[in-house]
Amino acid sequence: MKNINYVVNLVQMDTRDFSTHNVPFITQYCIHAYKNELRFKADKSVKVAYLKMNDVLNAPMPRDYEYYTKVAINFGGQYITLTRNNDIALQRKVDDCGLPKIQDVIINDKLLDPFLYSYGYYYAPHYRNGQYVGEMYSMGGGFNEAGYFREDWELRQFQFYNVASKEVVVEYVADEEATGNTMIPFAAVEPIRQYALYQMVEHDRRVPLYEKQRAQDRFRYAMARYSEIVWMWTAEDYMDACYATTKSGPKR
């Protein structure tokens, strides 16, 4: 593990500029590369949040929420993945006191049959109330009886419809704060370094176009290599994927 200041020092070494004048600019380029290019486009790290719906079937988004990877409800101790539906009417009604008004919808309270679901999704390992949750699984989505959800970006909340439970679990990519002291994987050093170098020549009118193109190519190559490292399967990952779809039957 290295911090972003380590990458800043490498960029200064590459440019042979050891003054403090450009350090704030280089640091911001590195932070932007880490948050935008790596965290949102190439990295596979996520967070998990447990939310509680209110009486009008809304649940607030986590403060650092950017986009979801999975959304599920807890029904009788079993997590069932919900389906996104952007046609759901957003909650905008209020009563005489200015409080959100309960929607005129029918809540599905029938018993869900877990045997209807033939596939599902694993959630990232995380902590809940101080307890480590190493393996968590939710049944597959796309079923009307499980319910739907929609993102309400104006009020930064989730809007749910026809769900049978009010406990929600969301796996999502977070917009984490970053500074020069933020720790990053060593594999992320090179793409961040190349991005900062690319941006420095991109905004320098004295640099010819072919040099800018070369800097961009170096950055793209570094990003491709980083993606290969992050997403590369191990032998155990491959065997797990094979065994997950293998069934044992009687020998005849």
Image: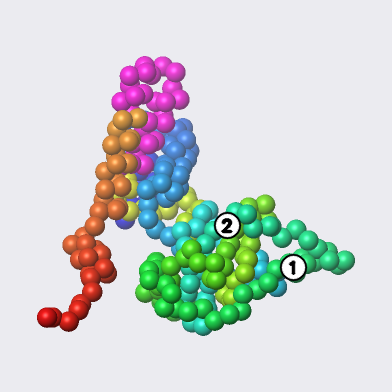
Task: Please tell me whether residue 123 is drawn above or below residue 186 in the rendered image.
Answer: below
Rendered-image quadrant of the C terminus: bottom left
User: At 17% from the left edge and 82% from the top edge, which residue is drawn?
Assistant: 250
Instruction: Identify which amino acid the numbered label 2 is placed on.
Output: Asn
User: At 75% from the left edge and 58% from the top edge, which residue is drawn?
Assistant: 92
Residue span colored magenta: 190-215
Q: Could you tell me which secondary element the residue under label 2 belongs to?
A: loop
Which residue position holds label 2? 85
Rendered-image quadrant of the N terminus: bottom left
- 208 or 7, nearer to the observer: 208
User: At 25% from the left edge and 64% from the top edge, which residue is drawn?
Assistant: 241
Asked if residue 212 lies in the magenta stretch, the reply is: yes
- 89 or 220, nearer to the observer: 89
Task: Please tell me whether residue 111 is drawn above or below residue 229 in the rendered image.
Answer: below
Which residue position holds label 1? 104
Q: Is residue 127 visible?
A: no
